[in-house]
Image (cartoon, grey):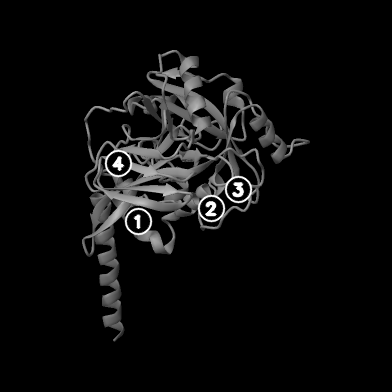
Amino acid sequence: MKKRILKIFVALVVAIFVASTLNSLLAYRIKRWASINAGKYYEYSGVVNLQTTYSSGIATYHEIEKMCDSLSLHFVIISDINTTGPMRQNLSHRFGMTLVVPGVEIAASNTSGRYLVIGDSIPLLPGGKVTLDAALQDAADKGDLVVLAQPYDVSGDALTNYSRTKSITGMELYNSDQAWRSTLSPLLINKFIGGYFFYGFDTEVLNYWLAYPSQQMKAFDFLNTRRKIVGIGSIGASGITRIGKDSNWHFPTYQSLLDLVHTVIVTKVPFNGLYHHDRAILLNAIRNGNDFVAFSGLEHARGFLFTAKSDTSEAILGDSLRLVDHAVLDVAIPDSQNVETQIVRDGKIIATYKNKGTVALQVNSPGEYRVQVFQKRTMLPFFLSRSFPWILSNPIYIFR
């Protein structure tokens, strides 16, 4: 009897291993080479929140710059932990096509959370007579974006301080470092198995780890019904680990994470190649919420556009729009194959569309409207369809 139970257990473990590794390959990346068309708007994609050797990272500024440029990223916002050294040393510049923008991650005690400060001024750091609240309020008063990082810890418990101060003007909708660490839990170990064992052959298996950040989005919707909160996507790459004491192989690598989750800005004014001009456009777009989170490991999402029109006025994601009689929401996505588009108002899904590249929806009520798009993959063991998040937009705020 014991031998039979042991055989069944071994067979189950083998089946989980095989299904997990095969599923990681089925979460493939779609290669799309069509031109990007956002109409009269311009879109630029980049990465936010990663650390260098100035704090807890294992790559230098120059190494990250080279990787970002090789991936054709338009910008990288580096936020080393509890240090303003890169800002004071004026490491702001352009490397190839990539804008390099230093920021700061303020990591307070476990009960006080983590915060990104992104802007033009050198922020205060808590310590001595400077409290955490005073440092964050000072950054907000200077017009910097103050982002709540990792609003939920890896155990899924809410950080109760997410609305502790009015100085918070943004939050991470997704943090890839936090997400991959959650795969180490017993219920998600199959994701870790699948991603880890094929990672050495194809880094795109990290797509298998992607999951809709339901807790973050619930908090995001709740806060936006009270005051405007900007959403961004984050790398949080300080958690990269070295495999072996003397090894040069890391898991996951910066390169793979840099191509997994992007923040894409939407602007009416194009970059012109001059650093300070382009930096101002970038920071202004992020501060205003004129951006969306793209899980580019599945498929690059530039070309997605969410606008609203009422009477003679038009708004893009992050903007406010006065409701005159009714408004029309327009959504365009760059690929509609095996795709589901959802329109959300005040945290509730009000419309769902399958495999449609363009959507137009008339609405008659004020509210915070945003869009989320999912791509589907067929997974083992029962060949069921599983949804992966692809696009998460900031809201358009429609008012009377």
Label 1 and label 3: CA atoms lie apart by 29 Å
> For mark 2, what is the residue?
153
| Contact, mark 1 vs mark 3 (Cβ under 8 Å) | no
Q: Which residue is mark 4?
A: 359
Specify the amino acid type for callout 3: Tyr
Give me the C-alpha separation between circle 2 and circle 3.
12 Å
From mark 4 to mark 1, how far is it between C-alphas?
Answer: 33 Å
Residue 169: x and y, percent? 58, 37
The secondary structure type at the circle numbered 1 is: helix
3 vs 4, front mark: 4
Is residue 394 at all visible to an observer of this figure? yes
First of labels 4, 1 by sequence position = 1
Residue located beneath label 1 in the image: 191
Q: CA distance from mark 3 to mark 4?
A: 34 Å
Q: CA distance from mark 2 to mark 1?
A: 19 Å
Q: Find out whether the residues at labels 4 and 1 contact each other: C-beta distance under 8 Å.
A: no
Position of 130 relative to 85 (above/below): below
